[in-house]
Amino acid sequence: MTGQWTFGTRLGVGFGFAGLVLLIIGTAGYYSTHRLIENDKRVNHSHQVRRELADLQSELKDAETGQRGFVITGKESYLAPYQSALEQIKITFDRVRSLTTDNVDQQRRLDKLLPLMESKLAELKRTIDQRRKDGFEPTAKVIAEDQGKELMDSIRRVVAEMDRQEQDLLDARSAEAEATASATKAVILWGSLVGVALVALFGWYMVASLRRQIGSAVQHIQSSSNELQAAATQQTTVSREQAASMSEIATTIKELVATARQIAESAQRVAGIAEDTARGARTGDQTLKGAQDAVANIRGQVDLIVSHMLDLGRKSQQIGGILEVINELAEQTNILAINASIEAAGAGDAGRRFGVVADEIRKLADRVGGSTKDIKSLIEEIRGAVHTTVMATETGSKAVDVGTRQIRDVSAGFQQIVRLVETTTEAAREIELSTKQQTTAVEQVNEAIANIAQASRESEVSSTQTLQTVTELTGLSRNLARLVQPQARA
């Protein structure tokens, strides 16, 4: 079965087997070390409990010492150890209870110790209060009754029992730790020896198997390297020819790119000129529209003038009719004045003043008749001027119509120019865009050709290196054959 394994598989199996052996040894060592650490923690735990018990007993002694010093001297300064001990006793006791929560016997002893401590502290407080109140001698008598000593002895017995149990636990845990350490050393030592032996045996088997497999592979490598050397030589020649062809194509593409850029620049200039022309045509069209509006206003004013002239003609005709009536009245007045003068002359002195009035009326009628003739003459002149003005206005109106039509034609021409120029601009922009796209495409082709040329040169270099590598591979295969098969040295 192992004859079908690859070189990598064989190495993987070999390293995997070695790793498995190391894993087994490491696991056993880890388990033993873990047990050793746990035992060490339990040993340290026992030491800590014993230290806390010693601290608790020492704090009770400090409280008792402070109480005795105060009773003897009566000085408050001697109560400093007592005050400090009161603060620490509760803390230390709680630590001991917390450390022994897993030990039922120790918890039971702590339950027994707590009221003894409270009684002792109460006894100390009573003596201190009595010393302050009654003085030294009564207090000394109370102390001499040895009640405090009995409480302290009971406390010492309970603490001693707890310390003995912790010492027993400490001895047992220390022995277990030593046994675990010895077992750990044995596991690591014998496991390492067995692992080295198994790895060496498996390695010898794998080396022998690999030697047989590599020996046959080396022969194939030697024959293949000879064929590869011939192919590499041919590939080097082809790569050189391909690199030369790619260089010529790259030069042609560069010229094509330059031409395309010139076309794009020309199209851009044409588009700019066309845009300027379109703007000029739009400006001219707007100017013509303004002129057309002005001519339309002139036509309206001319029509208004003609209307006013015709109205003036009609008014002058009406004035002429009125003047005819006035002229007739003047003639009749003149006739009546003449008749009145004749009648006044026939009347003698009585009609003289009436004759004077009649003469004045006749003179006035003559002046009115003369004035009407002058006015009639002026009206005739006005009629002629109105007629002439109407004729001239009609001629101007016709000229305005002709100018309006011409302006419309010119405006239509400008609009046609704008449309043609816009079409030209759009075409120029399309040419510019197409040329730019073509330039981009050609540049991409040029870049691709350059990459191909570079690849050809690199291929040539690679082929040369391949040829050199094949030569070295041939030599290495011979050396490998001599290493794997010692008989090949000959």
Image (tube, rainbow, N blue to C red):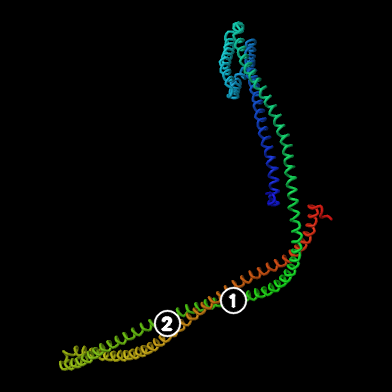
User: Which residue is at the front of the view, 65 or 478?
Assistant: 478
Q: Position of residue 424 (x, y in %)?
A: 53, 78
The residue sitting at 57% across, 73% down in the picture is: 434
Count of marks placed on residues: 2
Give the numbered dot on residue 295. 2
- In the image: residue 376, left or right of residue 44: left
> Residue type at mark 1?
Arg
Between circles 2 and 1, the one closer to the viewer is 1
Of labels 2 and 1, earlier in sequence is 1
Q: Position of residue 322 (x, y in %)?
A: 25, 87
The residue sitting at 64% across, 70% down in the picture is: 445
Q: Residues within 10 Å of mark 2 (few under 14, many from 20)?
A: some
Q: Position of residue 199 (x, y in %)?
A: 73, 42
- Asked if residue 360 is positioned above or below residue 217 in the image, the reply reads below
Give the numbered dot on residue 278. none
User: Which residue is at the front of the view, 398 or 244?
Assistant: 244
The residue sitting at 65% across, 68% down in the picture is: 448
- In the image: residue 471, left or right of residue 406: right
Q: Disc 1 on helix, strand or loop?
A: helix
- Asked if residue 32 is positioned above or below residue 324 in the image, the reply reads above
- Asked if residue 167 is positioned above or below residue 323 in the image, the reply reads above
User: Which residue is at the front of the view, 178 or 249?
Assistant: 178
Label pair 2/1, CB-CB below 8 angstroms: no
Q: For mark 1, what is the residue?
A: 269
- Asked if residue 233 is positioned above or below residue 282 in the image, the reply reads above
- In the image: residue 255, left or right of residue 318: right
Quadrant assignment, res 157? top right
Q: Quadrant of the C terminus?
A: bottom right
Distance in Å between CA atoms under marks 2 and 1: 39 Å
Q: Disc 2 on helix, strand or loop?
A: helix
> Residue type at mark 2?
Val
Quick check: can you spot residue 14?
yes
